[in-house]
Image (cartoon, rainbow, N blue to C red):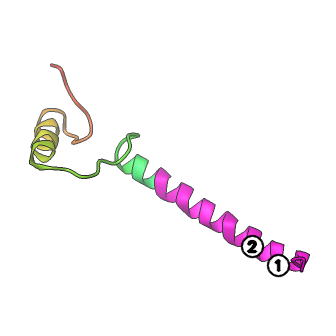
Amino acid sequence: MPVPFEALIPLGIIVGMIGVTGTLLNFTKRIRHEGKPPRISLDTWDTQMMERDRRLTGSAHRQSVA
């Protein structure tokens, strides 16, 4: 039994909106983390290094060699 073409319009809208929301979520997370992907599964070492980076550079997402 074929799918009526009227069903493809709402399906396209739903898929499009899911894609738009996913893209916007990714964009806002990258803006918040200064262009880098968000860090996941942080342990104590990572948290301490982020705190050190924040004290050195003013941001937890940048590193400094100076």
User: Residue 63, located in which quarter of the rendered image?
Assistant: top left
Circles 1 and 2 in contact, beta carbons < 8 Å: yes
Q: Amino acid at mark 2?
A: Leu
Q: Which residue is mark 1?
A: 7
Callout 1: helix, strand or loop? helix
Viewer-closest of 1 and 62 = 1
Density class for disc 1 (Cα within 10 Å; few <14, some 14-19, many ≥20) is: few
Considering every residue shown, the one lying at the far top of the view is: 66
Say which residue appears at 21% left-offset and 42% top-offset: 60
Instruction: Provide residue 17's location: percent of width, then percent of height.
Output: 64, 67
Viewport quadrant of the N terminus: bottom right
Report the side of 14 relative to 66 (left or right). Answer: right
Instruction: Provide residue 30's location: percent of width, then percent of height.
Output: 42, 47
Say which residue appears at 77% left-offset and 76% top-offset: 10
What segment carries the magenta color? 1-27
For residue 11, the mark is 2
Q: Amino acid at mark 1?
A: Ala
Q: Is residue 55 magenta?
A: no
From mark 1 to mark 2, how far is it between C-alphas? 6 Å
Main SS, magenta residues: helix
